[in-house]
Image (cartoon, helix red, strand yellow):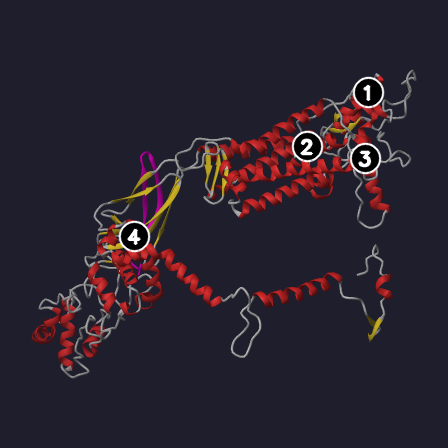
């Protein structure tokens, strides 16, 4: 829009470039002065930049520049600095026993923070962000434990994993009574009723009576004569309300058929000892005893 | 009825008139600045302005140096906006960021007070207490010391460059910069411990923000008070435009009483005063005006209501033997009434002023009530969402909560936390064996602490899946109740 207070004669005097479209003529106006100077300044800056910073690619490398700047080196340095910052407490986590960590409020608080973060990134995939697990994955918030709920037990389980391979891992395997044809379908149906009865629920008394001998023969060695389980073998208590693989009759029947057991990695292979300790402290602190 | 003088092109133009003429005839929207050299004046309003100048500047430069005893480890400065710690200290008061509404309230009070004063007395704020006016006055004082009064300054401006001119101008700018430097520096004292930041400033170890705000305030003080002066009020400040909404016929403003002054004209000794006005057209009201206007043209938006023209005119009136007050604080209504030979009446109580007073009293009352009922302890309890609850082997149920206690007192406190409405509840922190029904959370003075809590309740089939409970946070007589919910089932 033409501004009445601004003279337009300058523009009109500029020579035409000869380009014309529908009567609209392109004039050969000079570039705006400010733009031109910014452009020249950018050229000067670029020359300086080549000297100071990495700039030109070569055949076997690139010009390094006088500052010898490298983002990779900077990142490595930053990570090193981070370890320096965290150093003192990480060293304490490494050198102190689990009980000492729990007894020191500041260190415990640090361990809980580290533990929560590591748990969220690694354990929550199976056990859930809140740690209550799910079907096939242990609930870490209550007071029912497969391999023991003491600080040391939890630390050991996290370290070596469950059925993770190797000689030290928490290892036990329930036979696949159905798939391997160790028990007949009728026997398994009776045992299902027996397990339902163990947990205090109503079951067919005749089936329960029939299942007593096979239970004593096949199950009691791990789950105990009373079905109370055995934490040294990772055998669950069958009399409580906590069910790893489901509480319904078909869940129990399926467990008898496949004998499935989940796998947890040996986390000491992936984390530094201090991190495993922090995880143990976190899980123990948030569990029900 | 209206005997207000018409704009007379034959009369000498005031600086503002000239600027307007430039704007109209000089082409474009740009008005070239006409330098204003206000003449020194003596009188009642000038004296009040000197006193206010001294008092307000003393407050600005001095207030951060006032010390105030607070417990060990806390700032000992009476007025301090501590951004890094998130606290505002004002003598016995210390506010948390969450209490920003008190600042809002203070600003509302300031705005309403400004409205009320403006409705009653016009732009008193502008003329007497606005920092722009105060520092401009101070800068003109310096200018006068170096270059002399109005006439000397006009002459110096017109004179060719000489040693005398250079040292006078140079000296003036040096002192201006020194004042700006001090002003910009003093700003930082409100945000940091004053003695510390001063020594840090000179040793180069103060925060970058200190140097940046120092530089910004130095620059603005120097340019706004020294170089731009009345242009700030005329072009930059929105207040002159807003004031029209508060001012009416009954507002006391600096007024040329044209009923008494007109017809004006030069007056020689021994001439009669009959049949003519008291204004002898000496132009003194215009030459003392820091805004460069002629008050005799009636109310103008440039006018800051400072009353210097009234002082100047009074001086002349005494000399020519006429009563003072040809220019005075008066209302439009009164002037027009007198012009019509009616007795002038003044109405301070008007619906407008009454409305402002009521609002002001309301907001002030709210502030006072709020400050006197300020809670010493603020608590929030948030229940864990994941998991909502955990059922234990024995059927008992455990919920997790995060408790946050803000101790806004100046002493360390231990808060005893318990749960109401949940029989048999046991409270413990993570990593702790639960056995007691209370939990103790320690919070240092003027600080917040949060704690993760587990609340376990025995198995109870009669308990609803979602039960309203109340957390009791107690420290001596100070009891805070915070509502929450205890979940013990999925509600199906």
Closest to the camera, between mark 2 and mark 3, is 3
Q: Which quadrant would the C terminus of chain B be assigned to in this image?
A: bottom left
Identify the magenta region: B466-492
- Give me the C-alpha separation between circle 2 and circle 1: 28 Å
Tag 1 secondary structure: helix
Q: Position of residue A143 (x, y in %)?
A: 21, 59
- Give me the C-alpha separation between circle 3 and circle 1: 30 Å
Closest to the camera, between mark 4 and mark 3, is 3
In which chain is the residue bearing label 3?
Answer: B
Q: Considering only vertical position in the picture, is A186 above or below B482?
A: below
Tag 2 secondary structure: helix
Say if mark 2 contacts mark 1, CB within 8 Å.
no
Residue linked to disc 1: B317
Residue linked to disc 2: B138
Q: Which of marks 3 and 1 is nearer the N terminus?
A: 3
- Give me the C-alpha separation between circle 2 and circle 3: 20 Å
Residue linked to disc 4: A107
């Amino acid at each position: 829009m033409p501004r009445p207070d601004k003279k337009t004669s300058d523009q009109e005097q500029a020579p035409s470039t000869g380009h014309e479209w529908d009567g609209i003529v392109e004039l050969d106006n000079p570039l705006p002065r400010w733009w031109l100077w910014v452009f020249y300044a950018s050229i000067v800056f670029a020359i300086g930049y080549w000297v100071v910073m990495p700039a030109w690619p070569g055949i076997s490398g690139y010009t390094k520049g006088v500052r010898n700047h490298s983002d990779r080196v900077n990142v490595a340095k930053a990570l090193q600095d981070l370890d320096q910052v965290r150093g003192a407490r990480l060293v304490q986590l490494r050198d102190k026993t689990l009980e000492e960590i729990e007894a020191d409020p500041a260190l415990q608080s640090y361990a809980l923070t580290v533990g929560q973060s590591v748990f969220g990134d690694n354990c929550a995939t199976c056990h859930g962000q809140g740690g209550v697990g799910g079907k096939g994955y242990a609930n870490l918030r209550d007071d029912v434990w497969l391999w023991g709920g003491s600080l040391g037990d939890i630390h050991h389980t996290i370290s070596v994993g469950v059925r993770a391979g190797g000689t030290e891992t928490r290892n036990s395997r329930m036979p696949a009574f159905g798939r391997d044809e160790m028990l007949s379908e009728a026997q398994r149906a009776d045992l299902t009723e027996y397990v339902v009865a163990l947990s205090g629920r109503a079951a067919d008394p005749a089936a329960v009576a029939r299942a007593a001998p096979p239970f004593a023969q096949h199950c009691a060695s791990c789950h105990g004569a009373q079905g109370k389980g055995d934490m040294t073998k990772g055998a669950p208590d069958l009399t409580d309300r906590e069910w790893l693989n489901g509480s319904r009759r078909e869940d129990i029947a399926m467990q008898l058929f496949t004998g499935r057991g989940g796998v947890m990695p040996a986390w000491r292979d992936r984390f530094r000892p201090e991190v495993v300790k922090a995880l143990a402290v976190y899980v123990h602190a948030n569990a029900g005893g | 009825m209206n005997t207000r003088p018409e704009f007379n092109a034959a009369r000498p133009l005031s600086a503002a008139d000239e600027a307007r003429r430039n704007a109209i005839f000089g082409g474009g929207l740009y008005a070239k600045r006409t330098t204003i050299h206000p003449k020194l004046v003596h009188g009642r309003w000038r004296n009040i302005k000197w006193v206010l100048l001294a008092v307000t500047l003393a407050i600005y430069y001095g207030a951060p140096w006032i010390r105030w005893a607070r417990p060990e480890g806390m700032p000992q400065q009476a007025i301090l906006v501590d951004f890094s710690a998130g606290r505002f200290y004002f003598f016995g008061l210390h506010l948390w960021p969450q209490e920003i509404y008190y600042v809002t309230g203070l600003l509302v009070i300031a705005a309403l007070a400004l409205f009320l004063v403006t409705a009653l007395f016009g732009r008193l704020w502008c003329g007497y207490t606005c920092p722009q006016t105060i520092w401009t006055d101070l800068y003109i004082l310096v200018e006068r010391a170096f270059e002399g009064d109005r006439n000397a300054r006009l002459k110096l401006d017109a004179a060719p460059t000489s040693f005398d001119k250079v040292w006078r101008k140079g000296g003036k700018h040096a002192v201006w910069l020194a004042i700006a430097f001090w002003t910009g520096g003093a700003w930082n004292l409100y945000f940091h411990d004053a003695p510390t930041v001063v020594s840090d400033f000179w040793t180069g170890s103060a925060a970058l923000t200190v140097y940046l705000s120092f530089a910004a305030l130095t620059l603005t003080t120097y340019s706004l008070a020294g170089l731009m002066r009345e242009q700030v009020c005329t072009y930059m400040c929105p207040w002159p435009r807003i004031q029209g909404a508060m001012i009416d016929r009954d507002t006391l403003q600096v007024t040329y009483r044209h009923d008494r002054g007109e017809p004006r004209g030069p007056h020689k000794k021994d001439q009669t005063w009959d049949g003519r006005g008291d204004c002898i057209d000496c132009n003194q009201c215009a030459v003392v005006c820091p805004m460069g206007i002629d008050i005799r043209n009636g109310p103008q938006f440039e006018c800051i209501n400072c009353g210097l023209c009234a002082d100047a005119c009074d001086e002349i009136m005494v000399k020519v033997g006429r009563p003072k007050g040809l220019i005075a604080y008066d209302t439009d209504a009164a002037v027009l009434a007198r012009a019509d030979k009616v007795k002038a009446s003044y109405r301070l109580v008007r619906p407008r002023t009454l409305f402002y007073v009521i609002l002001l009293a309301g907001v002030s009352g709210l502030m006072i009530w709020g400050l006197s009922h300020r809670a010493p302890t603020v608590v929030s309890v948030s229940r864990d969402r994941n998991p909502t609850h955990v059922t234990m082997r024995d059927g008992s149920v455990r919920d997790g909560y995060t408790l946050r206690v803000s101790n806004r007192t100046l002493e360390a406190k231990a808060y005893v936390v318990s749960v109401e409405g949940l029989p048999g509840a046991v409270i413990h922190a993570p990593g702790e064996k639960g056995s007691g029904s209370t939990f103790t959370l320690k919070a240092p003075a003027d600080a917040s602490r949060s704690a993760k809590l587990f609340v376990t309740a025995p198995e109870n089939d009669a308990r609803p899946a979602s039960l309203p409970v109340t957390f009791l946070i107690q420290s001596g007589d100070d009891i805070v109740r915070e509502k929450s919910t205890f979940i013990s089932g999925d509600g199906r």
